[in-house]
Amino acid sequence: MPRILLLLQPRPLGHGGGEIQLLDHSRANLNELERIFGLIGVKINSSVPCRDLTEIKRMGNADLNVVLGYGTLLAKKMEESFGIPYI
């Protein structure tokens, strides 16, 4: 198991806050996507690369991983470990 997965907090039972997680290699892309999703009321749980340790710990709470560019391997591992689907 990748070490990053060991840092993640498990998904709470009954979690269903409708939060998504963004995975991409470009912080500029992520910032713009966070802005756009915010305009339509979609809450961002975290984005990868993460800004800090707190954001890394929240990664396991997302309801969906949105993968752009790089990040498919991590998304697959998170689906296996935490049941978080990805697109």
Image (cartoon, grey):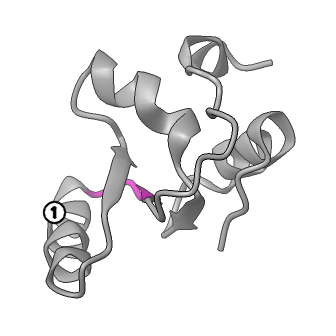
Tell me if 53 is positioned left or right of 22 in this view. Answer: left
**Image point (25%, 74%), residue name:** 33
Q: 84 or 68, which lies in front?
A: 84
On whether residue 58 falls in the magenta region, the answer is no
Classify 49 as above or below 65.
above
Q: Where is residue 86 in the image (x, y as percent from the top left)?
A: 68, 65
Classify 3 as above or below 44.
above
Q: Where is residue 16 in the image (x, y as percent from the top left)?
A: 57, 57
**Image point (49%, 36%), residue name:** 59
Question: Image quadrant of residue 40?
Answer: bottom left
**Image point (32%, 74%), residue name:** 42
Question: Image quadrant of residue 25?
Answer: bottom left
> Which element carries disc 1, helix, strand or loop?
helix
Q: 70 or 52, which lies in front?
A: 52
Q: Give the range drawn in magenta.
A: 20-26
For mark 1, what is the residue? 31
Name of the residue lying farthest toward the front? 14
Q: Where is residue 4 in the image (x, y as percent from the top left)?
A: 58, 19
Q: 64 or 24, which lies in front?
A: 64
